[in-house]
DNA sequence: TAAGTGCGTCGTT
DNA sequence: AACGACGCACTTA
């Protein structure tokens, strides 16, 4: 699934730790949660920032801060999802249509992209989401109002939903 | 009710 | 051919 060519990796400090945003020539192509093994960002990436990337990064920082506060989305730069398969991109686009404070089931996502039987595959695509939080895969729950899974810590899924005012199921 | 099993299903590796 | 961030029917306790 050879990923996009990363041009810049920039930190985003938040009240929940330091996230890392990745940009290709086309736009935002990745976002990762704060991690213990805090990757030092190459100093080189901080110099010679194209104004376009500065602008993108400002938008992403603001959007992330809002999202972490459970607020509806702000303006985002173009997203570079080209690394995903056609199916994955379909799913990721669908996720962006889930309103803040709302949730869909994996089955509903599957239906919304015209593949009603691909529920399980939708789970796989959610797990491959390169831009969590901003592409809100945390808003997808399992049927029967169960929580379902999450690639990063399940606590992130709980926390994000909780901040959006969603009544989070126990399991 | 709650928890566990089995199987259909389908995109990805 | 094997493996899932699934869903459903069905069995147990």
Image (cartoon, coloured by chain):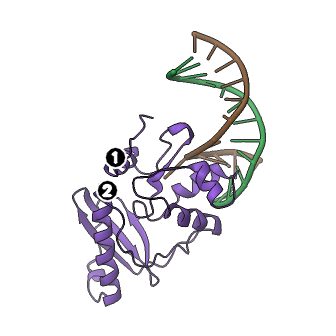
Chain colours: A purple, B green, C brown
Residue A154 visible in this rendered orientation of the protein: yes
Residue A50 in sight:
no
Q: Mark 2 belongs to which subunit?
A: A
User: Which residue bears the numbered disc 2?
Assistant: A70
Secondary structure of the residue carrying numbered label 1: helix
Comparing A121 with A104, the one in front is A104
- Image location of residue A23, percent across then percent down: 40, 77
- Confirm or deny contact between disc 2 and disc 1 (CB under 8 A): yes
Chain of the residue under label 1: A
Residue in the image at 39% along x and 66% along y = A31
- Residue A22: quadrant of the picture: bottom left
Could you say whether the residue bearing mark 2 is in a helix, strand or loop?
Answer: loop
Residue at 41% of width from left, 45% of height from top?
A: A154
Q: Is A36 placed left or right of A97 in the picture?
A: left
Quarter that holds the N terminus of chain A: bottom right
Estimate the x, y position of residue A80 in percent, counting from the top left. Answer: 49, 76
Query: Where residue A119 sits: x, y (%)?
Result: 64, 50
Residue shown at 28% from the left, 77% from the top: A58
Q: Residues within 10 Å of mark 1 (few under 14, many from 20)?
A: some
In the displayed structure image, the side of residue A50 where residue C10 appears, left or right: right
**Residue A110: x, y in percent?**
63, 55
Between the C-alphas of marks 2 and 1, the distance is 8 Å
Q: Quadrant of the C terminus of chain A?
A: top left
Return the residue nearer the eye: A170 or A37. Answer: A170
Badge 2: few (under 14), some or many (20 or more) residues near its Cα, within 10 Å? some
Badge count: 2
> Which of the two residues, A42 or A88, is positioned nearer the viewer here?
A88
Question: Which residue is the site of mark 1?
Answer: A162
């Amino acid at each position: 699934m050879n990923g996009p060519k990363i041009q810049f990796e920039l930190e985003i400090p938040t009240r929940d730790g330091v996230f890392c945003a990745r940009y290709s020539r086309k736009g935002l192509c990745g976002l990762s949660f704060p991690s213990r093994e805090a990757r030092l960002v190459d100093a080189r990436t901080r110099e010679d920032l194209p104004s376009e990337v500065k602008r993108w990064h400002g938008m992403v920082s603001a959007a992330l801060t809002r999202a972490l506060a459970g607020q509806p989305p702000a303006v985002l730069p173009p997203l570079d999802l080209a690394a995903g398969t056609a199916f994955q991109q379909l799913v990721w686009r669908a996720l962006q249509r889930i309103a803040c404070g709302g949730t869909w089931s994996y089955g509903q996502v599957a239906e919304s992209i015209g593949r009603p039987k691909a529920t399980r595959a939708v789970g796989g695509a959610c797990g491959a989401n390169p831009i969590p939080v901003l592409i809100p895969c945390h808003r997808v729950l399992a049927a029967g109002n169960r929580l379902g899974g999450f690639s990063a810590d399940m606590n992130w899924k709980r926390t994000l939903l909780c901040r959006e005012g969603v009544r989070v199921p126990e399991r």
